[in-house]
Amino acid sequence: MAEAEIPEDHPRHDSLVTRHRIEAGVEKGITSRQGLIAQGRGEAFDYLLGERTLPSADAAARAAAAHLLLADHPVVSVNGNAAALVPGELVALADAVGADLEVNLFNRTEERMRAIVDHLLDHGASEVKGLAADARLPNLTHERAKVDADGIADADVVLVPLEDGDRAAALADLGKAEIVIDLNPMSRSVQVADVPIVDNILRAIPNITAHAHELAHAERAELERIVGAFDAAATLDDAERAIRDGDLS
Ligand code: PTJ
């Protein structure tokens, strides 16, 4: 079934669209085969969360928008799952907050890097970083350490989607603020994030963009107030409580 043929009123519409996009991403050489497994893990958490954006995740998306608008050099990091699921939405977010897009992969190959850069350009990006890989994040022994000197290496705020790993901690060690999107409130990356967003990337990216548009003319002091009032630990606790106490009837 093609994505356009999935009926809007199907009870699992979003989940089917997501699977379809990930499958197409693998076929195009954008998403790694491990990305299929990662999607399955995310989907299980989304099911337990009731496939909805919690009010606490919406508040996190608002804090993320404020962070990105306050940043001197925000960068949106893109992996193979994010590129397959929300390419146009990532470009729209980067435009809304003046961020760079940079491809950064765990299963890095030159072919996949190029395919993702081209995919984002096809979806309206004017420039995509990541191919230069002329800088390294210290204390990371895997491919995610490879970054652009004028991209993630120079950023003060980095948005990190869909990774349960040690890069967010490495970014924090460098004094960068990280916004992490992950449906698993126990993933290593959300646990160390300045702003953890426990939500499906399909909902989270357009939501951050909507908040950024709404806050576009806000005073700096107002943005700083939103960032200062945000409580990362309470956000994670709320998501975990929703999963544990969830009424799935
Ligand atoms: O493209 P690459 O080579 O950089 O590889 C990307 C993957 C995602 C394969 C790689 O980063 C990986 O293996 O990730 P993990 O360790 O499986 O972590 C992925 C996290 O994303 C898990 O904690 C999932 O819960 C979460 N996740 C999966 N799908 C979604 C999601 N979170 C939000 N929205 C989703 N649609």
Image (cartoon, helix red, strand yellow):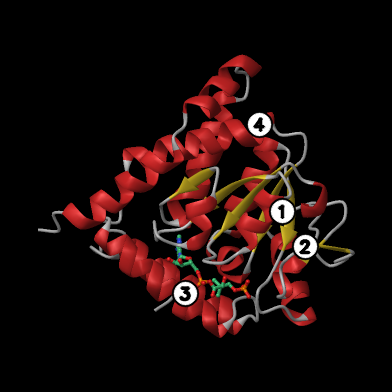
Task: Indicate which label's residue lies in the foreground, 1 or 3.
Answer: 3
Name the residue beneath numbered marker 4: 69
Which residue is depicted at the point 45% across and 62% down?
A: 187
Return the mark for residue 138: 2
The residue indicated by pointer 3 is: 38
Quadrant of the image for the C terminus? bottom left
The amino acid type, in three-letter code, at marker 1 is: Gly
- First in sequence: mark 2 vs mark 3: 3
Question: What residue is rendered at 31% in x and 69% in y?
Answer: 44
Q: Could you tell which of marks 2 and 4 lies nearer the N-terminus?
A: 4
Cβ atoms under marks 2 and 1 closer than 8 Å: no
**Foreground: disc 2 or disc 1:** 2
Mark closer to the chain start, 4 or 3? 3
For the residues bearing labels 1 and 3, Cβ distance under 8 angstroms:
no
**Looking at the image, residue 170 lies above or below residue 196:** below
Quarter holding the N terminus is: bottom left
From the Cβ of disc 3, is ligand 1 less than 8 Å away? Answer: yes
Q: How far apart are marks 1 and 3 (CA)?
A: 27 Å
Q: Nearer the viewer, mark 1 or mark 4?
A: 4
Please report contact status of discs 2 and 4: CB closer than 8 Å, yes or no.
no
Within 10 angstroms of label 3, few (less than 14), some, or many (20 or more) residues? some
Residue 234 visible somewhere in the drawing: yes
* Residue under numbered circle 1: 124
- Would you say 4 lies left or right of 225 here? left
**Dots 4 and 3: beta carbons under 8 Å?**
no
